[in-house]
Amino acid sequence: MNSLLLLRPPTFSAFSRQSKVSVLNPRFRISCSSARPDSVEAAEYKPGVFDDLFLNLFRSRMVKEVGWDSEKPGYEGLIDVANQLMKKSKSNSKVTEAAVRMLISLFPPFLLDLYRMLVAPIGGGKVAAMMVARATALSCQWLMGKCTVNSVNLPDGSSCSSGVFVERCKYLEESKCVGICINTCKLPTQTFFKDYMGVPLLMEPDFTNYSCQFSFGVLPPRPEEDTALMEPCLEICPNATRRKEINRNLDDKESVQCPKA
């Protein structure tokens, strides 16, 4: 959260329910208005000096939750541990609960409570939403790949620079699994920000091009209405390939919902 110190005081207007819009200036100037800013091409992400630190910290928390570590180094080992978390848990809800606990463990005691109580209420929640959008874009590219802050439509009808667009999610691409994306990333991250930081979050992964739109300040739909939870397995998913071999009676073009989602 040290990146939050980079924020300037925001300006406000009134919060639309849609969330995809234009990329903002990569200097992270905060603005909030009903007009959509012109898009600006962001520079290609280059690994930073803290990337290994973030990776090792994140992996260590996941290893502690799973009770197992992979022999593989770096990011490849992290994906192995995520797969093990899926395998050892009795249900998808248990996976999500474990991932939420892992996210909580990344923060110092009382920081989340203070943020939820003191920051989240300011400006109807817009300040907190814009702050976490910038913190996410600054600190999570080692996990997701290149991402940029953008403007999203909020429930009150205004647009605000509280979105993060991930061009091609490395976590999804490396895991090759809709279930891992949904249960170890999308659902727990939405729960974590809403329940522990006081910031609603809608995450919209695109399983065709591996992009993902984060919309801070926007509530996610109910699970039965969330289309991401109904997605079929990825073509590159090894589990999907094995299932196709077993279910030869299914038409090749027929999609099967990911059993892990």
Image (cartoon, grey):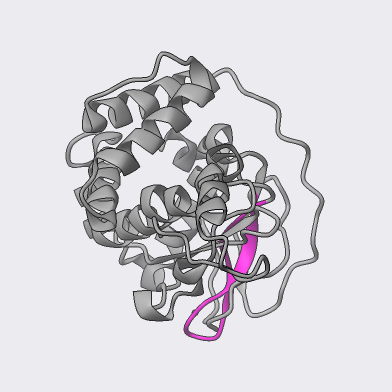
Q: Bounds of the magenta span?
A: 148-166
Nearer to us in this view, 174 or 241: 241
Work out which quarter of the rendered image holds the N terminus and state it.
top left
Residue drawn 57% across and 60% down?
Answer: 248
Q: Residue furthest front?
A: 249
Magenta segment includes 162: yes
Position in image of residue 200 (x %, y %): 38, 66
Picture residue at 25% right of the left edge, 60% below the top: 195
Tell me if residue 70 can be seen.
yes
Residue 183: x, y in percent? 37, 53
Residue 222 visible to the viewer = no
**Is residue 72 toward the left or the right of residue 113 in the image?**
right
- Magenta segment includes 12: no
State left or right for residue 171 relative to residue 146: left
In the image, residue 168 sits, relative to residue 228, either above or below, namely: above
Q: Is residue 207 positioned above or below 16 on the image?
A: above
Image height of 27 relative to 48, above or below: below
Q: Position of residue 150 (x, y in %)?
A: 65, 60
Q: What is the chief secondary structure element of the magenta stretch?
A: strand
Q: Nearer the viewer, residue 205 or 53?
A: 205
Tell me the quadrant of the picture where the C terminus can be found. bottom left
Q: Residue at x 46, y 42 (%)?
A: 4
Name the residue: 55% across, 42% down.
238
Q: Give the mark count.
A: 0
In this view of the protein, which residue sits in the foreground, 51 or 9?
51
Q: Is residue 16 above or below residue 150?
A: below
